Amino acid sequence: MKQVAHFTSLVLLACTCLSAQNSDLGFLFGFSQRNASIRDGVIRGEVQVGFQVNYAWQLVEGRAGRLYVELPVQFVAGSNGELSDRVIGRAGGIVFVTPGLRYHFNLTPRLAIYAAGGGGIAHKEERFGSRIGGQIVEVDRPKTGGAFNFGGGLDFRLTKLWSLRGEVRSFRTTGATTLETNSFSRRNVFAQFGFALHF
């Protein structure tokens, strides 16, 4: 977790040195995936939720749109379980810090669609629990590795200071086994909605 904190601090320090005409701070919440299945006598269930804080600095503005440098910090909380001849449960969270670029295409003075992408790191904290032979075994599995994101969304200006925002963005970890476990896959696609403050 310290690596994520140091990386975020460095990115924030670098971005504050940029001269930007506008900034925005977005808050988005949504779900990644929610499913349940029965296969080979094993019942499996999974749920993931996400919350994103996104701080962006405007670099360029034209008639067609605006270019931003952004710092999205995505928090993912997830859990799943398996029920068969034994009970297995997993729960934990991932923090993605993936700075990058975002471009807004102006459709009207109030409405814009945007595309975004970037790369950085992710840190996972996971607790694995299993009931074996009448005993409950718990193991912590922290990991840190590379990550990137890409996606797009819609921004609707309510006033000069506030806008409604919705997006679909994929947060992914790099490497074959960096953060991939039975609780979290390497691909975390979120549909999220919220608001943004412009200043």
Image (spheres, helix red, strand yellow):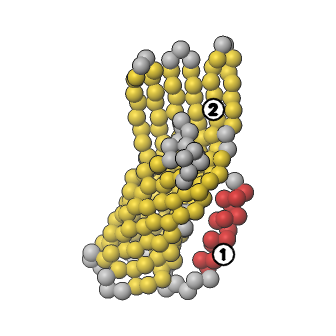
Mark sitting on residue 113: none
Residue 108: x %, y % from top left: 27, 77
Residue 75 shows up from this direction: no
Disc 1 residue type?
Leu
Residue 173 shows up from this direction: yes
Circle 2 residue: 128
Residue 2: x %, y % from top left: 72, 57
Disc 2 residue type?
Phe
- Left or right of residue 147: residue 47: left
- Left or right of residue 184: residue 157: left
Q: Are marks 1 and 2 in contact (CB under 8 Å)?
A: no
- Left or right of residue 66: residue 84: right
Vertical placement of residue 48 versus 2, above or below: above
Q: What element carries label 2?
A: strand
Mark sitting on residue 13: 1
- Number of dots carrying numbers: 2
Q: What element carries label 1?
A: helix
CA gap between label 1 and label 2 equals 36 Å
Nearer the observer: mark 1 or 2; the answer is 2
Which residue is found at the position 69% from the left and 24% from the top? 137
Vertical placement of residue 199 versus 132, above or below: below
Vertical placement of residue 196 versus 199, above or below: above
In this view, which residue lies farthest toward the left? 108
Which residue is found at the position 36% from the left and 86% from the top? 62
User: Within the image, what quadrant is residue 117 found in?
Assistant: bottom left
Which residue is found at the position 42% from the left and 19% from the top? 40
Q: Dot 1, crowdedness within 10 Å: few (<14), some or many (≥20)? A: few
Vertical placement of residue 165 versus 136, above or below: below
Q: Dot 2, crowdedness within 10 Å: few (<14), some or many (≥20)? A: some
